[in-house]
Image (tube, rainbow, N blue to C red):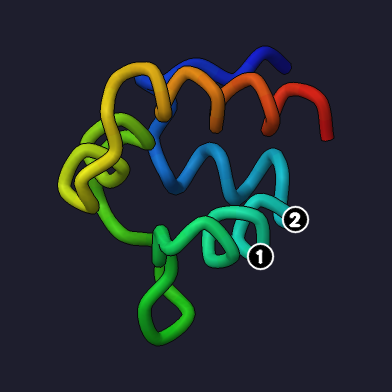
Amino acid sequence: MKITPEISIEELIEEMPESVKFLRDKGIICVICGEPVWGTLYDLASEKGFTDAEIDEIVNELNSL
C-alpha cells in the first residue's frame, strides 16, 4: 500500500497500526479514546502546523516503515 497525504486516518491505522506511535512521536495525535480521528493525514498534520514539505516528509517516512 502506498501512503499519500489524502489517506484517511482510519485507513492508515487499519493498514499500518505502527503509524499511531510514529505520528504521536511527531506530535500528531491520530487516535482519541481508541478511535481514529476523522479526516485525512494531510488535514490532521496541517491542523498541527506542519507545512506541505513537512507533510511530504512524513508521508515518505511512513512509506519507508
Q: What residue appears at the point 31 percent right and 42 percent down from the top-left corner? A: 45
Q: Quadrant of residue 62?
A: top right
For numbered disc 2, what is the local secondary structure? loop
Question: Tags 1 and 2 in contact by the CB under 8 Å rule?
Answer: yes
Q: Is residue 11 above or below residue 28?
A: above
Q: Who's the residue at 47% across and 18% down the image?
A: 56
Q: Which of 5 and 48 is in front in this view?
A: 48
Q: Mark 2 points at which residue?
A: 18
Residue 30 relative to residue 60: left or right: left
Name the element at disc 1. Answer: helix
Q: What is the x, y in percent for residue 44? A: 27, 46
Q: Which residue is drawn at 67% across and 13% down?
A: 2
How far across and down, in percent of the image, does residue 28 sit?
Answer: 40, 59
Q: What residue type is labelled 2?
A: Glu
Distance, label 1 to label 2, CA atoms, is 6 Å
User: Would residue 27 be found to the left or right of residue 26 on screen?
Assistant: left
Look at mark 1 in the image and give the residue it sits on.
21
Residue at x-position 27% and y-position 28%? 51
